[in-house]
Structure formats: structure tokens, C-alpha cells
Amino acid sequence: MVYDYAHYMLTEGRKIKENQIVFSPARDAYRMQLAEALNMNRTRILAFKNKLPTPVELFPSDHTTSVHPVKSLKPRRRMPQSSERTLDAPDLMDDFYLNLLDWGSSNVLAIALGNTVYFSVIYSDTILYFLMLAVVHSERLSRSRVGSMAWNSHILTTGGMDGMIVNNDVRIRSHVVKTYRGHQQEVCGLKWSASEQQLASGGNDNLVHIWDMSKASSNSPTQRIHRLEDHTSAVKALAWCPFQSNLLASGGGGGDRTIKFWNTRTGACLNSVDTGSQVCALLWNKNERELLSTHGFTQNQLILWKYPSMVKMAEIMGHTSRVLHIKARMVAQWLQLQGMRH
């Protein structure tokens, strides 16, 4: 700020008329000396010595420059509308209470057709089938039909038509190590949590039970910590959330048609979504916050949901009967075994 020059322009300068030219050698000399002493252009009070910085655009527009590039949007995933491969499954029992399919980490699909278990190597140049007669001694695992099973390390947990849940240690001859008593009708769903400490069971009595291994002792049976009664039909579909350890999703049968979300620490129902169809199976996406459900009557579709909003991201048709079984392939492990690149 040139205070002397500014004071002069605000006081004496106003006295000069716009069209009047005043010649004063003393005044001109004073102006020149003042400008030289302050090394400034006397026609400006403020001066910027450096180039102004480029302004930051708080709300990016469509016309962005290379100085502030906009992050590229995540590419939209392709949702398949048809199956990649279709295999015949004659004699596959259309029984809501049975679990007859599994997919191993070595890329072998096992499926029970009638009295035979078929093992199929799916993603290879040729599809190989191995036949094996499956003989289950029901009296050793349960006193009735075994409709559901779940592995927990070396423990095979089975659920029977009599409502009994049995833990079998496959390493020892006397394999029955614990029993669970709670369901009054057939056990049609079993899932162990990722921590291997909690077991969720669903039954034809419309109940979901949560059992906690950490609270059991050698002198007492495994403790049931929650009895969940909100479903109005059989509960076959169960899925533990991979990114939230105490979150369980369950699906009800034809008389219920809902997917419910539970806080297994408190037993509270967090949300309930009416799907409009019988819920047969549930599967969480381990890479995205998404849930896949398979359905029976009336459309036999698969639905991909965004969690927690439960907005439908995709609806896949193709099955002519209810989709009772669903398993995710262990892609990373299989690719590592095959020495292939994804």
C-alpha cells in the first residue's frame, strides 16, 4: 500500500477537474521520486508479483482439465442372463428339506442323484464323472433321515428328521461328541460361522436356533443362546455374513417368503424383506456387500441384492423348477491348484 500516493489521490486529486490539465514541475517531480523510492507502478495501490494460483474446483463439472482429472468410475459388472454351463441332473429329488449339492475347493462338484453320488470336474477340457454308492448308516449319525450337514474343521454336524443335531468327530471311532436338542421337527438348515464358534440351525418348526460352542463345557451340552421365532414357514436358507461376524441372514419357505437379518449377539431382527417367493438358499458375496438368494414358487429365480439397502441389482431366470441348492466355487484356490491366471 502506497499511503502517501493514496492520500494524495483521495484528497488533492479530486480537486482537479477531469478535463483540466495542470502543469506543475514540482508535483511531477514528487510523483516520480515517490514511485522510484517504492519501486511500484503508481497507477495501482495493490500489485501481484506472482501468478495467481489455479482455482480449486469444489464441484467438478463435465468439462474437467488435465490439472484436476476425475477418478474413473468403477466399471459396471456384467450380470449373466444365461447359464455358462448346464448339466443334466436326473433323479435329483425335489425335496425342500434335503441338501444334496456341494462344490469343493479342488473344483469338484458333488451331487446326489437317487442313491448315487456323482463327482464332476466342471471347468476342464473334458467333464469326468465318477460313480460312487453312498451308504449312510442313519442309526450312527441320527435316529432318522439326515437332511442337512455342515463341516466345522474335523467335526461333521448333522441334522435329522427327528429334530436332533449331532456333532460327529470323524477322527475317532466313537464319533458322536455332542448333541443339540431344540427343534421339534426336521432340521433342514445348518451353517457354522467363520469363527467356528457359533452354529445356526433352521427347522421345519419355523425356528432358527443359535448355538454357541464357546459357552459349552465338558460337563454341559452345547448352549443355545437364541431362539428366533419370527419366520412363519420352514427355514432352510442360512448364511453368515463374511464382513460382519455377528450378522446372520435367514430365508423362509413358501408360507413366509422373507429374508431376515439377525444380530446374533442380541437376537434382534435387524430387517425383514418380502421377496414374494419361497426362499430356498442364500449366499453372501465375499468381495462386495451383496447377497444372492434363490427361490421356488412362483418364478424359480435368482436375485442379487445390495446390502443393506436390499435394492435388487439383478434378477436371473432360467430354472423351470425351484432352485433348492446353491454353492460358490472356491475360485482362488482352484486357480492356484491349476496354475492358471484369472
Image (cartoon, rainbow, N blue to C red):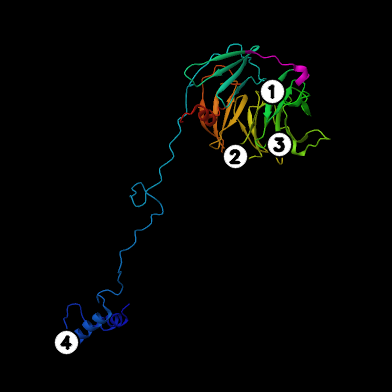
Disc 3 marks a residue whose amino acid type is: Gln
Q: Nearer the viewer, mark 2 or mark 4?
A: 2
- Label 2, label 1: how many angstroms apart (C-alpha)? 25 Å
Q: Earlier in the sequence, mark 3 or mark 1?
A: 1
| Residue pointed to by mark 3 | 197
Compare marks 3 and 2 and give the one earlier in the sequence.
Answer: 3
Q: Along the polypeptide, which appears first: circle 2 or circle 4?
A: 4
| Percent of width and height locating residue 55 | 36, 58
What numbered label is drawn on residue 148? 1
Residue at mark 3 to residue at mark 2: CA–CA distance: 16 Å
Q: Are marks 1 and 4 in contact (CB under 8 Å)?
A: no
- Mark whose residue sits in front, 4 or 3: 3
* Residue indicated by mark 2: 243
The reply to whether dot 4 and dot 3 touch (C-beta < 8 Å) is no
CA gap, disc 1 to disc 4? 110 Å
- Specify the segment rendered in magenta: 132-144
Give the mark nearer the N terminus: 4 vs 3: 4
Amino acid tagged 2: Phe
Expressed as whole percent of the image width and height from the top left, the position of residue 153 reads 68, 31
Decide which of tag 2 and tag 1 comes sooner along the chain. Answer: 1
Residue at (59% x, 30% y) in the render:
283
Q: Mark 4 highlights which residue?
A: 25
Rendered view: 4 above or below 239: below
Disc 4 residue type (three-letter): Pro
Q: Residue at x 34, y 61 (%)?
A: 53
Residue at disc 2, secondary structure: loop
